[in-house]
Amino acid sequence: MSSIFTKIVQGDIPAYKVAEDDRFLAFLDINPLVKGHTLVIPKQETDYLFDLDDNLLGDLMVFAKKVGKAIESVIPCERIGMTVIGLEVPHAHIHLIPIYSIYDMDFKKDKLKLTSSEFQAVADEIQSAFQ
Ligand code: AMP
């Protein structure tokens, strides 16, 4: 069965997309720790990040860097934190999180509740800053 992220790639379920090319996709985490919390994935479905082909992994990081630069240009933050967990969704992904402190990356915290229009506004801002 396809992962939920493959369903997003295929357009079968919606997501607040912020950047895309032929191999990678970035979209807002639906349970964000902070505004602008974004996931970056390879479109090719592989469960574990470290099982990706070396070139794909390297290019994913470069894509994530560009997404991170776009996020930090529109979301107030000290820098973009990056983490990989992958215990919930078996499709390799990188979390990009605008942070002021290490506590902004505490996954045990209550998640932000944003309305659909708030999610869309954040996604639109990041997307327009992505180059
Ligand atoms: P983990 O696999 O532990 O890195 O966590 C998966 C992350 O994916 C969590 O932060 C979820 O909130 C997020 N997530 C799960 N389903 C969706 C979805 N349909 N759209 C956006 N984010 C999602």
Image (cartoon, rainbow, N blue to C red):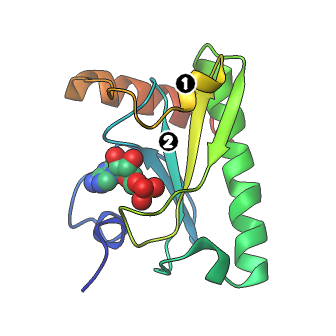
**Quadrant location of the C terminus in the rendered image:** top right
Whether residue 15 appears in this view of the structure is no
Task: Say which residue appears at 28% left-offset and 70% top-offset.
Answer: 7
**In the rendered view, does 111 fall on the left or right side of 101?**
left
Locate residue 59, reporting x and y percent.
75, 67
Locate residue 55, reporting x and y percent.
78, 79
Question: What is the secondary structure assignment of the residue under circle 2?
Answer: strand
Question: Dot 1, crowdedness within 10 Å: few (<14), some or many (≥20)?
Answer: some
Labels 1 and 2: the sequence-earlier one:
2
Write down the residue under mark 1. 104
In the rendered structure, which amino acid carries the disc numbered 2? Thr
The answer to whether the residues at label 1 and label 2 have Cβ atoms under 8 Å apart is: no
Q: Residue furthest top?
A: 76
Q: Which mark is residue 113?
A: none
**In the rendered view, does 52 fall on the left or right side of 31?**
right
Quadrant of res 126: top right
Q: Is residue 73 above or below residue 61?
A: above
Quadrant of res 52: bottom right
**In the rendered view, does 42 fall on the left or right side of 64?**
left
Q: Nearer the viewer, residue 74 or 84?
A: 84
| CA distance for labels 1 and 2 | 13 Å
Q: Is residue 95 above or below residue 11?
A: above
Q: Nearer the viewer, residue 17 or 99?
A: 99
Quadrant of res 40: bottom right
**Quadrant location of the N terminus in the rendered image:** bottom left
Task: Say which residue appears at 39% left-offset and 28% top-offset.
Answer: 109
Question: Which dot, 1 or 2, sits closer to the camera?
Answer: 1
Q: Is residue 16 above or below residue 13?
A: above
Task: Say which residue appears at 77% left-offset and 57% top-offset.
Answer: 62
Write down the residue under mark 2. 38
Locate residue 16, reporting x and y percent.
35, 43
